[in-house]
Image (cartoon, helix red, strand yellow):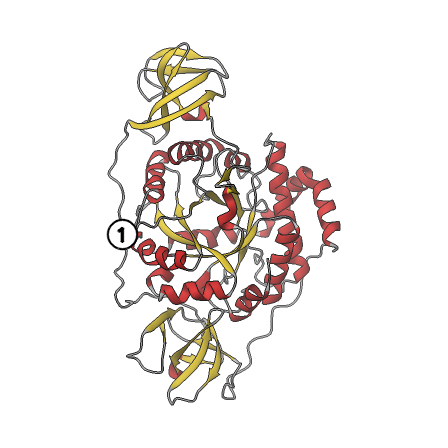
Amino acid sequence: MPRLAAQTRRKRAKTGWAAVWAVCLCATLIATAALVDSLRTLGHTPALGVGPRPPAAAPNIAPATPGSLLFTQAACAPVYAAPSASAPLITQLLGGTDVTLLDTQTAGWSHVRIWSHTDGYIPSSALKTTAPATASEGDCAFPGVADPQPDVLPANNGPFPLSARGATTAPTALYAWPAASAPPVASASMGAALRISQWASDGSGQPWYYAQTSAGAGWLWSGAARLDEPDPATHLVGGKPIWSAVEGKGMWFTNYLTRHADLARLVADAKAAGVTHIYAEVAISQWGFYAPLSLDRLLPVAHAQGIAVIAWVYPTLTNIAADVRMTQQVANYRTPGGDHADGIATDVEEVIASASVYTYGQLIRGLLGPDTLLVDCALHPFTHANYPYAAVAASWNVLTPMDYWHSRRSHVYTAQDVTHFVTTSVVTIRAAMQAAGVAQPIPIEELGQMYDMYSQDGAGVGHNPTGAEIIADLSAAKALGCIGASYFEWQTVTQSQWDALAAFRW
């Protein structure tokens, strides 16, 4: 199964800095006063961190010693629970992944630490003291785990049931059927009360509502209505903020990891590192809800250890109605044991037109109700100053900007650079929401970078942020009042990054 979401996310993050400087002027006009105050509070002067490229790794001239780093040389490097190929398999690492050597007491085997706290055994022949020239993921079978299969819902324009109330946001006509080409049957003024009983799609995938008004009943385009729902920024569930599940430190992973790891060990490692929540990719528009097996394997073991799981979907929004149905399918899924995801994360970065994002979010909110946590994984304002943050705030509870700061291949980044990048991103997003009339901006969980965007698969240390950069990112996010910080993505995290994440107390 191609890793479309990861590839797209990295492609977006590589936007050239020629565009960045043009966007910075716009961002500055929006948030100058707030930015200056925040920078002063954090006690630093912005700098660009320009410098030479890191020196090349030292040649492999001496045997590794305990505590030193080793690198997997090929994809699907096996990690066993004991020094035997018949021992339980813990995971299969990407080529170019670094591990910490613990000892080599068993001939032919290297006892290593992977992730933050997990130890295992890798055939010594699979490791070297220098990274391979090309990192790679590959694909391989993991014992007892089936490959994912596409599961795109059959085309269906509805109508579907929807019980909701709302009001028009502009004068609008009501039509005989859900299409602008249908004959109008009534008209509603701005602010007219709506009692909605159905939704449907027109031929282009745009959602429509069937509503009763004082002027009559008919179909109206969903973008002309606002549903009556509690404020997503302040809503409480069980006496706690709805965003509590994603408070603190989190990790993201694409579907590779849930198919190539002992998930009980993975969750135990997350717990040991202080991770409170995990984002797991399970659905993409082109393939539908293709990974229910990932939730079947992950949810029971995560919940047993108090780790929240957010089901991550990737809607392209080229057909909004189809993406709504896919997202609803994921949210309503229950494992054989009755577990369900603790929230839904939507990775909205393909179609980012404000109307598309707004209508998708409002209909999802109306179908799932106010108590379902919705997290939007958003593009950051350096590369997409026009991202519809205010449209997100109408329906989602949390916004996670993809603050991937390693966008200049030849630069050495400092902690100060990271702080400046994250501060500008968060302050600008909040200012953009307020400038658009959002009374209470939704909380932000900052999303940081733990991958090398210039390697084939994101693994490796050549252009991956350092542990010091991760500490700076976490510190800045916490100082800015973010509810947490999470990182993309687990299978490409370096040992220094794991050390930094585990050491930081949110």
Q: Position of residue 385 (x, y in %)?
A: 58, 41
Q: Position of residue 323 (x, y in %)?
A: 35, 39
Q: Amino acid at mark 1?
A: Pro
**Residue at 73% across, 40% down:** 33
The N terminus lies in which quarter of the figure?
A: bottom left
Placement of 234 over or under 146, stated as above or below: above
Answer yes or no: is residue 262 visible: yes
Answer yes or no: is residue 49 visible: no
Placement of 11 over or under 141, stated as above or below: above
Q: Position of residue 293 (x, y in %)?
A: 29, 55
Please tell me which residue lies in front, 202 or 390.
390
Image position of 201 (left or right of 171): left
Please tell me which residue lies in front, 103 or 290.
103
Q: Position of residue 287 (x, y in %)?
A: 30, 48
The C terminus lies in which quarter of the figure?
A: bottom right
Q: Can you identify the residue that label 1 sits on?
A: 336
Secondary element at tag 1: loop
Please tell me which residue lies in front, 171 or 107.
107
Q: Specify few, some or many for label 1: CA neighbours under 10 Å numbering under 14, 14-19, or 20 or more.
A: few
Placement of 190 over or under 501, stated as above or below: above
Image position of 8 (left or right of 204): right
| Among the 4 quarters of the image, the one containing residue 485 | bottom right
Q: How many marks?
A: 1
**Residue at 36% across, 76% down:** 81
